[in-house]
Image (cartoon, helix red, strand yellow):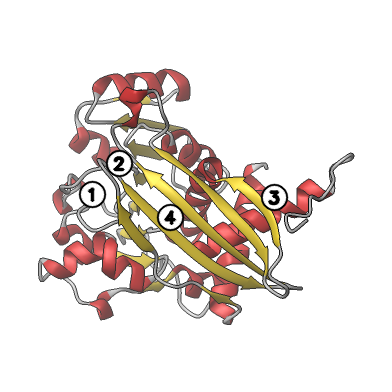
Amino acid sequence: MRREAWLDSAGIAFAALAAGRAQSPMPMAIDGVGGIFHAKAASLTLDRTWVALKLNGNFPDNRARGLPTIQGAILLCDGEDGRLLAILDSIEVTLRRTAAATALAARYLARADSETVLICGCGAQAPIQLDVLRGVVPLGRGFCWDRDPASAARFAAESGLAATADLAAACAEADVIVTCTTASQPFLTNDMIPPGAFIAAVGADKPGKSEIAPDLMASALVVCDVIDQCEAMGDLRNAIAAGRMVRTDVHGELAELVAGTKPGRTDAEQITLFDSTGTGVQDVAAAMTIYCRALDVDGARAVNFAA
């Protein structure tokens, strides 16, 4: 799908959450050997009810094995009769629906004149984050940074961004900052971020991961994808544990911005931050969209899994 379709599916997901037409229980985590499995499930009711369950394995050392860091599958089901409708490889869906949520948040939280981007973490998520963001803000230049300089150099060659080892200097010039790393210690601090910047904190999706220093969280206008999840596994969790924030310090959830019940950015000087942990409703909306589009392709045929 084109990036516009991914953005549309993200909008559907968060609008449904705001309207009470979606259920998204807390994710389940299961430890593996050198990695972790995440299970996320949700339902979404539009013209019909859709249900999806995603199981992803996240194994950071897989690059050395010649395997993707994230592997898994999504089961899409009919929520009214229980039929299994589709089995989808989850890698591309996870990457693109995550980036779509960043871009959707940027519509409300980034300055409309944002031109300079900084991508922190140059793995599989980086090019997709950059591509989808370019659909909502007029990014013209930027930087990329990674703890592995070779990864930053590769991404710079592919993207046209400038690889940098000076994270603080790149932050000082950035209007939009995306953190999509596997870091367990925060590397963005309050003194590094200029007024008016928008930060999409993507990497902290389980306890033990952290990208954003608690003091920076406390000074920013924080919007979560789902507050309950961010309190359990996002950078919000780390800020609360450090005593720098409480739950009620969060400005709101992305669904509230989409529904118009809470404002986004109200001041050009605000530092805004989107704490993104990924909700199963995004997976349902994306899988539903892909499934419906697939049935419209000439020659496509449905398979009866129950036969």
**Label 3–label 1 contact, CB within 8 A:** no
Which residue does the numbered mark 2 point to in the structure image? Answer: 181
Q: Position of residue 51 (x, y in %)?
A: 61, 67
Mark in front: 4 vs 2: 2
Front tag of 3 and 1:
3
At mark 4, the secondary structure is: loop
Q: Nearer the viewer, mark 2 or mark 3?
A: 3
Give yes or no for contact between labels 1 and 2 (Cβ–Cβ under 8 Å).
yes
279 and 11: which one is in front?
Answer: 279
Q: Position of residue 85 (x, y in %)?
A: 71, 57
Q: CA distance from mark 4 to mark 3?
A: 28 Å
Residue reaching furthest left? 242
Residue 80 vs residue 7: left or right? right
Residue lying at 89% horizontally and 40% vertically, measured from the top left? 298
Q: What amino acid is at disc 1?
A: Glu
Q: Earlier in the sequence, mark 3 or mark 1?
A: 1
- Where residue 211 is drawn, which disc sits there? 1
Give how far across and how far down residue 70 sits, in percent.
Answer: 42, 40
Alpha carbon distance from label 4 to label 2: 21 Å
Residue that badge 4 annotates: 110
9 sits to left or right of 99: right
Dots 1, 4 in contact, CB < 8 A:
no
Q: Secondary structure at mark 1?
A: loop
Q: Is residue 302 left or right of residue 9?
A: right
Q: Secondary structure at mark 3?
A: helix
Q: Earlier in the sequence, mark 2 or mark 3?
A: 2
